[in-house]
Amino acid sequence: MPPRAESAPISAGERLVNKSELVSRLTARLDGDRAKAMAAVNGVLEEIEQSLARGEKVSLLGFGTFDRRERGPRTARNPATGETIQVGASVAPVFRAGAGLRQLLAEAAGTARSVAAQATSAVTAVPAMAAGVTAPAIKAATKATSQGSKAGSKGSSKASSKAGSKASVKAESKAASKAASKAESKAADKARTKTAAGGAGKASNKTGGKSPKKG
């Protein structure tokens, strides 16, 4: 029987041990003799195939059982058209895992779940640790910003008050100076008017009291 072709991966991302890798692993067990390893793998597979072809069942204790399932002729329905069709007899190989293999897979699955749970726990713990470190820093930054804002507001209020007071004093001084100047000007005008009026009256009295000389 010709050597069996190596199978392609079933789906993307799936870890697949193909025939070549299986031979390589067996080669390591046979002190590096790859020819013996290849012959051993091919021999086991061929014997299983021939046994099933002869209608025999191959049972490997702890690993599993290779068997064949026979189905007689039957009537079926075409799912695309709904048409009734006749299906001939068929034979299909089947494999049933043994108790030892099922237990091994269960233990491996449990270990994998435990490792995954530990990894998830570690990933969850990282953000919590980061939050514990960043929270005090954020609190301190917020407090500093609040204090800075408070100090700025206080300084601004003080500067505004000082500027307002200075402007008020300046305005009052200017108004008082203007009022005093106006009052002085008014008093001076009044004094000049009074002086002029008094001089005119005196001159009139002097002229009126003299009698004209006769020629």
Image (tube, rainbow, N blue to C red):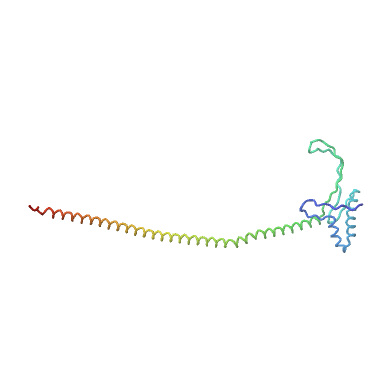
Report the residue at 74% width, 58% height from top. 112
Numbered circles on residues, count: 0
Q: Residue furthest bottom?
A: 31
**In the figure, residue 122 lies in which quadrant?**
bottom right
Q: Residue furthest right?
A: 1
Height in image: 70 above or below 120? above
Relative image position of residue 54 (x, y in whole percent): 91, 48
Height in image: 95 above or below 135? above
**In the figure, residue 86 lies in which quadrant?**
top right
Q: Residue furthest front?
A: 215
Q: Of 15 and 174, which appears nearest the observer? A: 174
Horizontal side of residue 52 vs 11, given as left or right: right
Horizontal side of residue 173 vs 202, given as left or right: right
Relative image position of residue 37 (x, y in whole percent): 88, 59
Relative image position of residue 67 (x, y in whole percent): 86, 49
Report the residue at 36% width, 59% height from top. 170
Height in image: 120 above or below 77? below
Report the residue at 30% width, 58% height from top. 181
Q: Of 171 and 110, which appears nearest the observer? A: 171
Relative image position of residue 156 (x, y in whole percent): 45, 60
